[in-house]
Image (cartoon, helix red, strand yellow):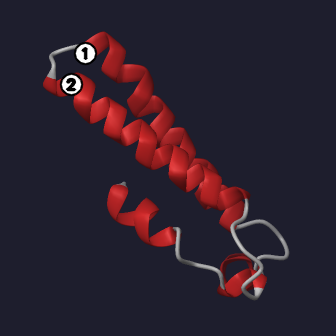
């Protein structure tokens, strides 16, 4: 998940260099949640680890869904046009 979320922070071509979008916030949430989940599981706190892993998945899934929204250049055209 980190291998997908981290490079996504440097993708600005779709908005012609305007700056970060809502999808960038979801990527940041994914990285933060993944770091917290890793910290907790290494400390043996499985119950506290679970919600962070769910948050990691939802953050990445939300960013993926946002990338498929109409008006997003390449992916929407590839899948739905």
Q: Identify the residue at image location x=69%, y=67%.
A: 20
Q: Residues within 10 Å of mark 2 (few under 14, many from 20)?
A: some
Q: Nearer the viewer, residue 33 or 46?
A: 33
Is there a contact, CB below 8 Å, between mark 1 and mark 2?
Answer: yes
Q: Identify the residue at image location x=43%, y=37%.
A: 33
Q: Is residue 34 left or right of residue 23?
A: left
Residue that numbered label 1 is attached to: 46
Q: Nearer the viewer, residue 67 or 37?
A: 37
Residue that numbered label 2 is attached to: 41
Residue 36 image offset from top left, x and y in percent: 35, 32
Residue that sits furthest to the right in the current view: 71
13 lies above or below 4: below
In this view of the protein, can residue 39 be seen by the observer?
yes
Question: Tag 2's secondary structure?
Answer: helix
Question: Tag 1's secondary structure?
Answer: helix
In this view of the protein, can residue 77 be seen by the observer?
no
Q: Nearer the viewer, residue 79 or 29?
A: 29
Residue 51 image offset from top left, x and y in percent: 44, 22
Q: Identify the residue at image location x=43%, y=72%.
A: 7
């Amino acid at each position: 998940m980190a291998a997908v979320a981290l490079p996504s922070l440097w993708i600005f071509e779709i908005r012609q260099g305007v700056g970060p979008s809502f999808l960038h916030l979801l990527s940041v949430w994914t990285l933060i949640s993944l770091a917290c989940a890793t910290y907790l599981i290494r400390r043996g706190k499985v119950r506290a680890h679970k919600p962070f892993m769910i948050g990691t998945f939802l953050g990445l899934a939300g960013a993926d869904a946002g990338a498929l929204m109409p008006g997003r250049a390449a992916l929407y055209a590839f899948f739905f046009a």
